[in-house]
Image (cartoon, rainbow, N blue to C red):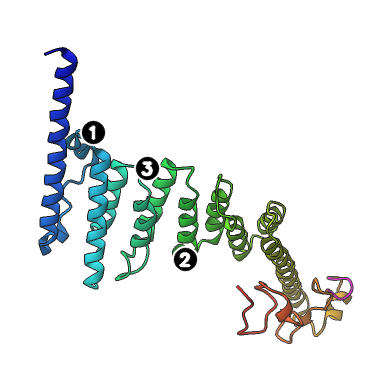
Amino acid sequence: MNSSRLVTRIATIVLLGSMACAVATLHAIDRLGLQSQAQQTLYFRSPKTLRRMSLGFTGLLADIYWTRAVQYFGYQHNQMSDDFHLLAPLLQVTTELDPRLLPPYQLGANFLAPKPPNGAGSPDEALRLLQYGIAHNPDQWRLYYDLGFLYYTELKDYGKASEAFWAGARLPGTHQFMPVLAARMAQHAGEFETARMLWYTTYQSTNQPDIKYNAVQHLVALRVDEDVTRLEELVEKYREQTGHLPTSMSDLERAGFIRGKPADPNGKPYKLMSDGRIEVQDPSVLLYITKGLPPGKTARP
């Protein structure tokens, strides 16, 4: 027997043996999955050990652990349990075995972040998972979307959400609304200069009429939010200096705080309310504003 045929035969035997081991491992996991005790078993926690055992088939083993993570989450969720303590370790092992496997990041973060029984109630673990995923898949804009969504919905960090959306917006093949989301988050965080830059960039970088219109309306709303914020700061400054609130814009003008009657982008003067708040005259024509609204009224999100 020549050497090439011997090598081929040995390689075939090793391959068949590895596949048999993998099938046996999966079968064992499936049998354990039928037992309630299996819900508290992680099997092997060390990716290094698992790599040695896999004989090079780390991708297959990552799929097995990902399947196990889904089974574990589904079981705990169906049981209305508040105990998901194995979920993060299962996802960690999965992603360390195959850092390029995307579903464990995208779906895994959605499993981890929400409060029980809809999730593990571990947004910090979800954050670590997505950051690891982005570090190993920096070209995947969807991971930046998931990161921004996590910052927005669970962590309430709108500045970080804006940064994540904007980072994803600069990648090839990204969705056209990524820069829109980035700008909205910056505006929501009160970062006026950043929001203005992002909305202007969004307007310049798209040929879609609806997105251009959306950007213009947000720039208008941004101007209103800035105006109202500045005017209310002047009202407070007037109160600190005089000991009482101004009764009209004329009081602010006589005190040297403003010149003329400040107006919104549609030319309608802002209203000074008796409690010192500033309101717009017609909120219905100013989409997306967050300032200058009557109490209890919200503008279009």
Q: On the rendered structure, is 167 left or right of 293? A: left
Residue 159 location (% of width, % of height): 56, 58
Give the answer, above or below, for where 274 lies relative to 174.
below
Residue drawn at x 29%, y 55% is 88
Q: Give the amino acid at mark 2.
A: Thr
Residue 240, visible in the rendered structure: yes
Callout 1: SS: loop
Residue that badge 1 annotates: 56
Q: Nearer the viewer, mark 2 or mark 1?
A: 1
Residue that badge 2 annotates: 153
Residue that badge 3 annotates: 100
Badge 3 or badge 2: first in the primary sequence:
3
Kindly report the secondary structure that dominates the magenta region of the rendered protein.
loop
Q: Give the amino acid at mark 3.
A: Arg
Residue 4 found in image quarter: top left
Count of numbered labels shown in the rendering: 3
Residues rendered magenta in the picture = 258-262
Residue 7 found in image quarter: top left
Judge the density around disc 1: few (<14), some (14-19), many (≥20) Cα neighbours within 10 Å. few
